[in-house]
Image (cartoon, rainbow, N blue to C red):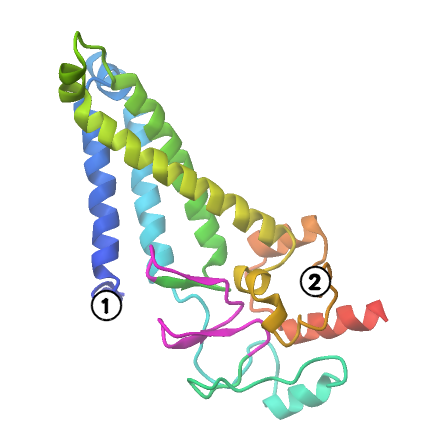
Amino acid sequence: MVQNMFRTGFLVRATHTLLTWVITLVLFLHNTDLRKCEERGELLLPILFFLLVVLSVLLYFAVSLMDPGFVLTDTVKGVQGSHEEMESMIPQTSTPRLRRCGYCLLQQPMRAKHCQTCKHCVRRFDHHCPWIENCVGERNHRWFIVYLMVQLLALLWALHIALSGISPSVTWELWFRVNGFLLAAFGVVGVFSVVVGLLLGCHLYLVSINCTTWEFMSRHRISYLKNCESEENPFDRGIFCNLWDFFCICRTVVWEKMYHRTTTNSV
């Protein structure tokens, strides 16, 4: 883990951490609701906000440094035997053959894709996120969404706190001088709130239909989807089952079996 921190993503992670704590410090030092609570001896809200920020930073590093589901061997977890045996179990008339990656030369499980930034194929690849400098895949996707939820909550709370500290002044020049840091914090937090909110909404929608960002954006180029109808998703089991499986079932899924079962039932 320590070695991962000092890869190419170190600068991004350091910037994220520094920006988070600078904004938090600004909110605590100015005459905001946090400062007023401290002066009255009411420490519950300041402590809760501080713990929420700490939790968001810990989740950020967990998602950033976590293995997203790299495909390191030709062995598909959850299936006994070789790939030849697995291919004989799955009729090739209804399921596209497993393809070998042209970059790492490993056989790709269904829904996997090679990330040229990470130099690995990733199981149930969603996208490569430059802000966490890591792929989002089968192993860390649920934690990525949990991180977005916590981050959005912290950002919205920070927006409210920043607004509470903006004080009036007799002139515009004095007003900007007095509230400059709070206004800068408010602007940064506002932009990130919009971005995180939109990102969270998109991911929750895609999870609810059991689709990844890569599949949604590149459907026409993916072998196991391009021959399906425009509204057809062979992995969709309904909103409740999709959300339950995504958030509550921690296991590696053999998507080839689900694909074959779905296509067989639809005939």
Q: Nearer the viewer, residue 94 or 251?
A: 94
**Principal SS element in the magenta part?**
loop
Q: Position of residue 220 (x, y in %)?
A: 62, 69
Does residue 46 appear to the left or right of 217 in the view shown? left
Q: Quadrant of the C terminus?
A: bottom right
First to last magenta residue range: 109-133
Badge number at residue 32: none
Does residue 75 appear to the left or right of 96 in the view shown? left
Circle 2: residue type: Asn
The disc, 1 or 2, on the residue closer to the chain's N-terminal end is 1
Q: Are the residues flagged by discs 1 and 2 in contact, CB closer than 8 Å?
A: no
Q: Nearer the viewer, residue 66 or 219?
A: 219
The answer to whether residue 44 is seen in the rendering is no
Q: Examine the image and state in which quarter residue 175 appears.
A: top left
Q: Position of residue 219 (x, y in %)?
A: 61, 66
Residue at 35% across, 38% down: 191
Q: Is residue 57 above or below residue 118?
A: above
Which residue in the structure is indicated by mark 2? 233
Residue at 38% across, 41% down: 151
Residue at 61% across, 80% down: 79
Q: Quadrant of the N terminus?
A: bottom left
Badge 2 marks a residue whose secondary structure is loop
Asked if residue 111 lies in the magenta stretch, the reply is: yes
Q: Examine the image and state in which quarter residue 153 appears.
A: top left
The answer to whether residue 70 is seen in the rendering is yes
Badge 1 marks a residue whose secondary structure is loop
Q: Is residue 42 above or below residue 129?
A: above
Which residue in the structure is indicated by mark 1? 7
Q: Position of residue 21 (x, y in %)?
A: 21, 39
Per the model, the C-alpha gap separating discs 1 and 2 is 37 Å
Does residue 190 appear to the left or right of 112 in the view shown? left
